[in-house]
Image (tube, helix red, strand yellow):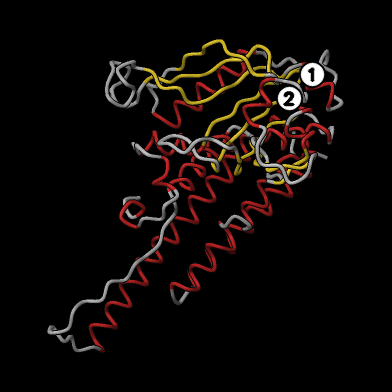
Amino acid sequence: MSNHTNHRMNEVLRKIQEEALKQIKEATGLDSLNDVRVQKLGKKGELTAIMKNMRELPPEERPAFGQMVNSVRKEIETAMEEKKQSLAAIARQMQLQSETIDVTLPAKKTGLGHRHPNSIALEEVERIFVGMGYEVVDGPEVEKDYYNFEALNIPANHPAKDEQDTFYITKDILLRTQTSGVQVHSMEKGKLPIRMIAPGRVFRADELDATHSPNFHQVEGLVIDKHVTFADLKGTLAEFARQLFGKDTKVKFRPHHFPFTEPSAEVDVTCFKCGGKGCRMCKGEGWIEILGCGMVHPHVLEMSGIDPDEYQGFAFGVGLERIAMLKYEIDDMHHLYENDIRFLKQF
């Protein structure tokens, strides 16, 4: 069954690639080229859809298939860029042949849009984990209190709830404070093993300052399988850090407490600006905190119908804005939301 599924998905992937390259070759303008981008590479495009079907593959086949998806995406993007340059050259040549330039007129500026730094950072994070065989899973921003707190080992009287207990719609429904609820939904389906990341927007009544906002984005990861250990968690996050910040990046795990994981840790990486020597970026410490993680608490597994004696897991969560701010040395989180073109055009 798995070989048939793998063959079918490979055929779909090959067909997507062939159709995209054919449409790019036949494109006669930037509008038709953009239609191909949306249809094949967009958030609701065909490549995004096939990534969501990775759960049908056996876990050992997912990394190879994820790398194939990334390879096809890169080939399509390369072909589109080449076609774009070709169309621009043709248009310029036609313009030179058909127009007489009046040098007394002021030039017209054409503003071209591009991806937001948050989107660039998210695509890089997704690329890394898809390459490891993870699937990308979406979930509701308006969530039940049970999935946002109780199913994560945070009962009504828990101190951790006070830190996030914020935007309620009714007594039992709120704007989610973390994307962990998506993980609970996946665990309840009972389709094991699980290797997933859940990116999305979250809401907390945080004070506005350079590094906090009531509306921000998280990327949370979850792995559930037999014989999973803390060593698997450390190896996964070490590889993630190397791919994101550079091959010489090292990680450090500091003991911490989260209600839904035990043991828990916060993770630091060596400063990619100074290599760990100490600078303004890392405030002279040589290390930068990037995320929290831990082994999934047995009670969390039990509440979702998973036997903790048979299955174990690990989870981690990173703030997307923090990744973008670190990679691009942005000193104020609110630059990401103010839509100031002087800031955005730098990316």
| First in sequence: mark 1 vs mark 2 | 2
Q: Look at 49% across and 67% down and name the residue there.
A: 34
**Quadrant for the N terminus in the image:** top right
Q: Looking at the picture, does residue 121 appear above or below residue 22?
A: above
The local secondary structure at tag 1 comes to loop
Residue 119: percent from left, percent from top: 49, 48
Q: Nearer the viewer, residue 298 or 96?
A: 298
Q: Are marks 1 and 2 in contact (CB under 8 Å)?
A: yes
* The residue positioned farthest toward the left in the image shown: 104
Residue 183: percent from left, percent from top: 72, 33
Query: Which corner quadrant of the image does residue 199 belong to?
Result: top right
Q: Looking at the picture, does residue 30 appear above or below residue 100?
A: above
The local secondary structure at tag 2 comes to strand
Q: Nearer the viewer, residue 80 or 43?
A: 43
Q: Look at 75% across and 18% down and name the residue there.
A: 312
Q: Look at 66% across and 41% down and name the residue there.
A: 167
Residue 56: percent from left, percent from top: 76, 41
Tell me the distance, in whole angstroms, between the alpha carbons under discs 1 and 2: 7 Å
Query: Which corner quadrant of the image does residue 284 belong to?
Result: top left
Report the label total.
Answer: 2
Q: Nearer the viewer, residue 293 or 206?
A: 206
Query: Which corner quadrant of the image does residue 260 belong to?
Result: top right
- Amino acid, disc 2: Ile
Tell whether 301 sits left or right of 256. right
Estimate how packed mark 2 is, as few (under 14), some (14 to 19) or many (20 or more) residues with alpha carbons within 10 Å: many
* Numbered circle sitting on residue 224: 2
Tell whether 169 sits left or right of 332. right
Estimate how packed mark 1 is, as few (under 14), some (14 to 19) or many (20 or more) residues with alpha carbons within 10 Å: some
Residue 205: percent from left, percent from top: 58, 37
The residue that label 1 is drawn on is 311
